[in-house]
Amino acid sequence: MIYDIDFETMPREALEAIQLRRLQTTLENVYAKVPFYKEKFKEAGIVPGDIRSLNDLSKLPFTTKQDLRDNYPYGMFAVPMESVVRIHASSGTTGSPTVVGYTRRDIDNWSDLMARALCAGGATRGDIIHNAYGYGLFTGGLGVHYGAEKLGASVIPVSGGNTKRQIVIMRDFGPTILTATPSYTLHLAEVAKEMGFSFSDLNFKFGIFGAEPWSEDMRKELEETLGIDAVDIYGLSEVMGPGVAIECHEAKCGLHIFEDHFIPEIIDPITGESLPYGETGELVFTSITKEAFPIIRYRTRDITSLHPEPCVCGRTHIRMKRVSGRTDDMLIIRGVNVFPSQIESVLMKSSETTPHYQLVVDRENNLDTLTVKVEVSESLFADEIKMLQNTEKKISKDIKEYLGVSAKVKLVEPKSIARSEGKAVRVIDNRQR
Ligand code: DLL
């Protein structure tokens, strides 16, 4: 089912006409209301009236995370505080958090887009949604919540944490859709097993997973363990929150970006040059309907590519490939670029290990070292040490073969790697000490 058939299946020409109109209005607005943008546009020698076609977008300067930090907390807001009805913030691992605001209309649009997204991910009015994304400053919990209500589904606002209680709720309330990070979902499945029942005995049909990178192999693992269809949802607080893009459950092949609200571009992360469809680079977004916190050419640091080919589901909105990582998550190990998701793919191929892993990077004698800590399956732990050593060697060989980097693989006891209740911490990099 398609929630907003007019907008989601609109012919590209009509869609692009709307995009241009909305872009021009947004530019006039930020130029008049946000001193940061006025200054930036002046430096670039540009005024909003210079943007006459969508191709002119690339004339505009980028906005970066640092710009948002420099204007912490409310410097990028385009409306007075009386018009702001909600504030969220993204924690970030370094520096001050990024603070974003929403007007009443922003919240209405976001709810609509999340209703669209949930619908694309398989939800209907009859569904019961177990929402285990965190409620609070993080946009995941409330974003899904408002969308689920807008769709008319029943939402259980359980948030992250209190895992055993969540399992009891899942058993007793009969939810049919799970919304959570993939890493927390694995933890939920593990605790359910400890409590004596399997996820596949529950009522779930679909899982709508996102907020962190996860691999295609992780999808297979989740689908098999949980006996559900797993769909990828993407978003970021700077642009809105969850619901910027989602896979349709029909194709599960790339995430449709809601282009009547956001214009995506792909750039070379080093030179900043625009890249054509199909090429991999950094994703950049311009929001074209936001009132409180509009954003122009925001560099997300997320790595993906854009694909305009029509989709079997009938949506005309462009698809982005699953995010493989972030430019700032990329590890450079002795000159080789490594994304945690690539290591994850290799680990998923080993039947003796579990999907719980952590990468530890260090420097010894001026050389980078990478240690991959991965938990062995419980069934195997009692077996011979020799067999474990073989598994370590095999994974290490596979990583070398697939990624071209040497890694020490260390099998660790079941449940010894910290579990996530939100976004997983996959990398500990001790080199920056
Ligand atoms: O994570 C919003 C969200 C909530 C998305 C729930 C999906 C579901 P932030 O906390 O601002 O917002 O983090 C945004 O998370 O730039 C990506 O690096 C990463 N991310 C989000 N979704 C995905 C995904 C939310 N499906 C940052 N795949 C983004 C890979 C993702 N990375």
Image (tube, rainbow, N blue to C red):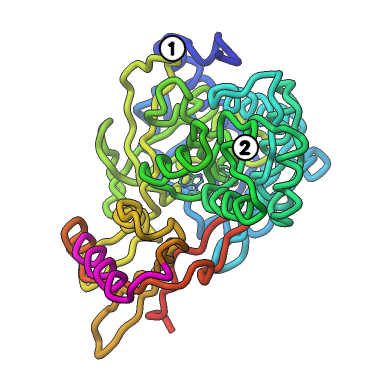
Is residue 30 among what the camera can see? yes
Question: Percent x, y for residue 278?
Answer: 26, 33
Does residue 406 appear to the left or right of 301 in the view shown?
A: left
Magenta residues (range): 381-398
Question: Percent x, y for residue 124?
Answer: 65, 19
Does residue 168 appear to the left or right of 232 in the view shown?
A: right
Instruction: Tell me the amino acid under the disc marked 2.
Output: Leu
Q: Residue at x 27, y 75 (%)?
A: 386
Q: In the current view of this chain or complex, which residue is farthest to the front?
A: 383
Instruction: Tell me the amino acid under the disc marked 1.
Output: Gly
* Residue behind label 1 places its C-beta within 8 angstroms of ligand 1: no
Q: Residue at x 23, y 70 (%)?
A: 393
* Residue behind label 2 places its C-beta within 8 angstroms of ligand 1: no
Residue 329: mark in rendering: none
Question: Percent x, y for residue 337?
Answer: 25, 62
Which residue in the protein does label 1 denote? 314
- For residue 279, which quarter of the picture? top left
Q: Of the residues under marks 1 and 2, which one precedes in the sequence?
A: 2
Mark in the foreground, 1 or 2: 2
The crowd level at tag 1 (other Cα within 10 Å; few <14, some 14-19, many 20+) is some
Does residue 165 appear to the left or right of 270 in the view shown?
A: right
